[in-house]
Amino acid sequence: MTAITSTLAPSNLSSRTGLRDTLRHTGALIRRNLLSTKATPEELLDVTFFPIIMTVMFTYVFGGGLKSSTGGDYIEYLIPGIFVQMLSFGSIGVGIKLNSDFDKGLMDRFRSLPIARVSVLSAHLVSSVLRLLLASLITFTVATCLGFRVHTNVFEFFGGIALLLALGFGVSWLSVYVGTVVRSPQAVQGVLNIALFPLMFCSSIFTSVSTMPGWLQAFAKVNPLTTAADSARALMVGGQFTAGHDVWITLAWAAGMSIVFAPLALRAYNRHI
Amino acid sequence: MNTRNPSEEIAIQVEGLVKRFGEQTAVDHVDLAVPAGSVFGLLGPNGAGKTTIVRMLSTLLRPDGGTARVAGLDVVGHAQAVRRVIGLTGQFAAVDEALSGYENVYMIGRLLDMPRKEARQRAEELLAVFGLEQDARKIAKQYSGGMRRRLDLAASLVGRPRVLFLDEPTTGLDPARRNDLWDIVRDLADGGTTVLLTTQYMEEAEALAQDIAVMDHGHFIARGTADELKVRIAGRSIRLRPVVAAELSALREVLMDVLGAADEVAPGTVGGPVSEDAQVARLLQSIAAQGIAIADISTVTASLDEVFLTLTEKKGGVSEKTSVPEPTHDDDSSALEAAR
Ligand SMILES: Nc1ncnc2c1ncn2[C@@H]1O[C@H](COP(=O)(O)OP(=O)(O)OP(=O)(O)O)[C@@H](O)[C@H]1O
Ligand SMILES: [Mg+2]
């Protein structure tokens, strides 16, 4: 009995899945992710409610004190930073989702099907971007209600969002990597919080770097969240905020994180059982 | 039934299969051949290696040695092609809890390249087969354990697999649902599907499987049909009750003589193991020669539970009588009682 003569064998013996099939499978899995978000919208809290709380808290509680360092209208300073915070922290979600697929045995089900393994991962990445776009819309609406106004043109504004999404994409690969190597969804959250919280507070998101002690300034100035927040301010608010090299540095960070973590993540993901 | 000739086509062929986890050998040189359209039952205590075998055959785990072919295809070299012919229900339900029952099954149809309409019809059909049509739109998080299990089974049948792996498929099902599943498995086998199932329930293996393997510590320790295992492994025993109770010890001596062992198995009754058919005739001759009058005589064939316990006690690490778990069968029947 050989492989090819068995009457039980499928007609298609290929070990590859065509690109069109993979796209269709990815589509079916994106649908699954969106339905899942629809059924449990509380998952969106950390990218909707959390940024709103931060906005309100920093505007009304600390805003008065911080204003002197940032100059002008504090909310105009803050909101682009809130977008940076939301889009970087929001990227933790993809690692959590992936990890719980392994954890709950769903990945076994997918792996027993004749689909390309990567379709599960790409569906999570696309769904993550869609969730973040929705969250951006909500944050923007709330910010507008609180008095935030865009002073730049549409292209610059969306360029700013795209830049932050690019950085979020880099963080997503880190998140996928962590999501594949740690043992539980909670651990993914924990590890990435530890990585991101110091970056968030030691950045220009909430206050000007110039108010920090010298040794911290050195760190805060190269921090990608600082360059991202400064770029976002220039692109979304304009006026007194100028970008300089920050846009390019942020793009370099985004590309660098993807270049470093994507191969690591893909390798870990493909080996995971 | 159908026209296929089971002896010609081997659906699952395993030779010298090995899987190690660190120091431990979970599956140790296992050989196996399952004819197409038959049901193969894999029995064994916790940790025997059943799930590990299923995971290797369903391409989820890479074997460390030996070969395994499913539908003639190597599970490593032709993994993707193997996935086109198999269905898998793992030991733990793999359903997306945030999705409705319907969406779970529909998604599998779409992932198996069915057009939307076909995927929709197939999902509705299977949910009805598993009695979930009422709850099809409820999210699976709100399902009971047994409902999840049935949803998982429905998902594994979407692609009409030719080879189906069921890892403890009836765990958590109530008696009615379990009988339903047994009927479904029989129907599938009649339709030519090859089924490999693992179970803790002897009764289940006996009811479904033509061929049974008992495994422990990664080895197959016995193989055969349910009847063969019962007779060959645990053997038969004979029980005799003399008319006059005073003759009990004399009768016991005769049994000791002919069968090599004897015991008072019940008040006024002695019994001993029968290993060959000729022993029964010799025993009766000796009893007649002694002039002992017999009131009652019976032979008993071991239940599969006893076979299972005999085997796993003898070869396994569980040698202490006290550490032998309650027969699963008993657990099950009490669970059934509770469910009623
Ligand atoms: N991923 C793993 N890593 C390490 N050891 C494992 C792994 N999977 C299984 N084992 C070990 O291999 C042995 C066989 O496990 P397996 O799950 O195949 O048993 P089983 O027969 O399915 O048991 P049960 O009836 O409890 O489901 C066990 O001793 C188990 O501890
Ligand atoms: Mg198991």
Image: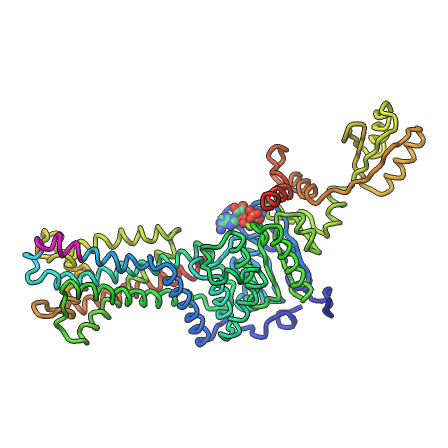
In terms of image quadrants, where is residue B129? bottom right
Tell me if residue B60 comes above or below residue B312 in the rendering.
below
In this view, the residue in front, B25 or A40, is: A40
- Across and down, in percent, residue A58 comes to 15, 55
Residue sitting at the far top: B246
Residue sitting at 79 percent across and 38 percent down? B237
Residue sitting at 48 percent across and 55 percent down? B143
In terms of image quadrants, where is residue B234? top right
In this view, the residue in front, B115 or B280, is: B115
- Across and down, in percent, residue B31 comes to 65, 55
- Across and down, in percent, residue A262 comes to 34, 64
Tell me if residue B287 comes above or below residue B114 in the rendering.
above
User: Which span is picked out in magenta?
Assistant: A56-66
- Would you say A72 lies left or right of A10 here? left
- Would you say B333 lies left or right of A106 here? right
- Would you say B325 lies left or right of B245 here? left
Query: Main SS of the magenta segment?
Result: helix
